[in-house]
Image (cartoon, coloured by chain):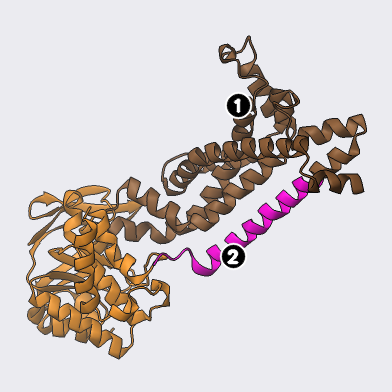
Chain colours: A brown, B orange
Amino acid sequence: MNATFHLISSGDAILWDIVALSLRISLSATLIAAFFAIPIGTALAMGRFTGRKVIIMFSSSLMALPPVVVGLAIYLLLSRSGPLGEYGLLFTPTAMIIAQSVLIFPIILALTTEAVSPLEKNYRRLLNSVDASIWFRLKILIVDARFSIFTAVLAGFGRAIAEVGAVIIVGGNIAGSTRVMTTTIALETSKGNLELALALGIILVMLAVGVNSVMHIFKSLGQKYHGVLR
Amino acid sequence: MELNFNSVSFRQNGDTLLGPIDFKIKFEGITNVLGYNGAGKSLFLELCHSMIQPTYGSVYWNGHSARDTKNLRGFIFQHRVTLYRSVKKNIALPMQTAGWNKQLIKNRLEELLFMANLETKSNDPASTLSGGEVQRMALVRALATYPKMVIMDEPTSSLDPSATTQFEDLISNSANSGVKFLWATHNINQAKRFANDIIFISDGKVSEISEAKNFFKKPSSINAQNYIKGL
């Protein structure tokens, strides 16, 4: 255990490079997924069209997508013989960002829809009475549900940073290039190098606990203030 | 200002909730909408405003489609309907949707907060206001963009007498400055004091439109007679 803590406290370059790459990939994937999922999730909460419930149910069920299957699908897309093979993205951090984005998009989408729906129900008649445009409604709902939406984004980030199945397939676990915390833990454990695996495990757990704590803080802030803007 | 209902019906889940309604009315000052609970007053008001669209027929204001002239009318709900925002951001809502610039909104907000006697509460969350304050806020919000008509759905039904008086004073001042009101109420005395005209709704239809003094003296329908007698 001493060797493990020494690795963390001494600022070991290999360890912290892996942590930095993991954060860069998962934060990028979270931002990309959130960019699409937040407006689409809000629009789904606003929409009154046939089939809306089916779409919401379908998007919620996508939350349970098996990561290895997502990884396999992205692999087939990006492999040399695949439709996007010419871009040479397989076994790069970009491929890992794509895989994680696909994986967490349904999570942020479903949680955003769930967060915005009750607010939209409260606001609908008032916004109808002032003839608010669709863009105005989208904006006001996202701003006023921001605490809950941020919680949804954090949930997506939490899933991305802890994910191993998809990124190992499309990233290839190449040292110094696509090796992230989860894939390194898997590899180093199988090699018997438990110090590095444990050090990364501790950092990963701390990150997960940190993200969950922030989620709870934002959740209670949202409940307490209903996001009141002064 | 003229309102025209042209063969208007509203249906939901196969049931006709309102209509068919055909009438034309020219508004003078305050027009009260009366009728028993469940008669269709709220639906009628929402159709007048164009918050909802008729299943059949058309609603016209001064010869123009109600849908195209929605921003010329304000609306006040019976219950507390606010954004989870401060008082001033609630009042600013129609000005924002109308695309006013920040300076214009700021100037108009000062007038409206003064009018509603809410200057000291402008930064408070709207959720902390009392029932009377919420309805005064709703009234100045409805008046924010200088609408020609404000439609109100029983706005004083949950207010105490003092809050009702304050709200009524605001209505009188606005009516004196030329704003027309279409106002659903169950309070016969209130209608007697304020109404120029009465629209009586019964069983989802407009059963009577007349000058207030004539309506209260001699309502033409049995339903209206019973309603006035409190039966």
Picture coordinates of residue B94 (x, y %)?
25, 60
- Locate residue B178: give its quadrant: bottom left
Which mark is nearer the camera, 1 or 2?
1
Q: Left or right: where does residue B135 sit relative to residue B110?
A: right
Residue A74 located left or right of residue A172: left
Query: Where's residue A44, x and y in %?
Result: 46, 44
| Magenta span | A202-230
Main secondary structure type of the part rendered in magenta:
helix
Is B100 colored magenta in this rendering? no
Q: Quadrant of the C terminus of chain B?
A: bottom left
Q: Secondary structure at mark 1?
A: helix
Q: Quadrant of the N terminus of chain B?
A: bottom left
Q: Is residue A68 left or right of residue A57?
A: right
| Lower position in the chain sequence, tag 1 or tag 2 | 1
Residue A224 relative to residue B24: left or right: right
Name the residue tied to disc 1: A94
Mark 2 crowd level (few <14, some 14–19, many ≥20, 10 Å Cα): some
Residue located 29% across and 52% down the image:
A132
Seen at 18% across and 84% down, the residue is B169
Q: Nearer the viewer, residue A113 or A221?
A: A221
**Can residue B33 be seen?**
no
Residue B84, relative to residue A210: is it above or below? below
Marks 1 and 2 on same chain: yes
Percent position of residue B192, x then y: 15, 84
What type is the residue that disc 2 sits on?
A: Ser
- Badge 2: chain ID: A
Residue type of the residue flagged with mark 1:
Thr
Cα distance in 3D space between marks 1 and 2: 35 Å
Q: Does the magenta portion include A224?
A: yes
Label 2, on which residue? A220
Q: Using the image as rendered, state which of residue A4 and residue A114 is in the foreground.
A: A4
Asked if residue B99 can be seen in this view, the reply is: yes
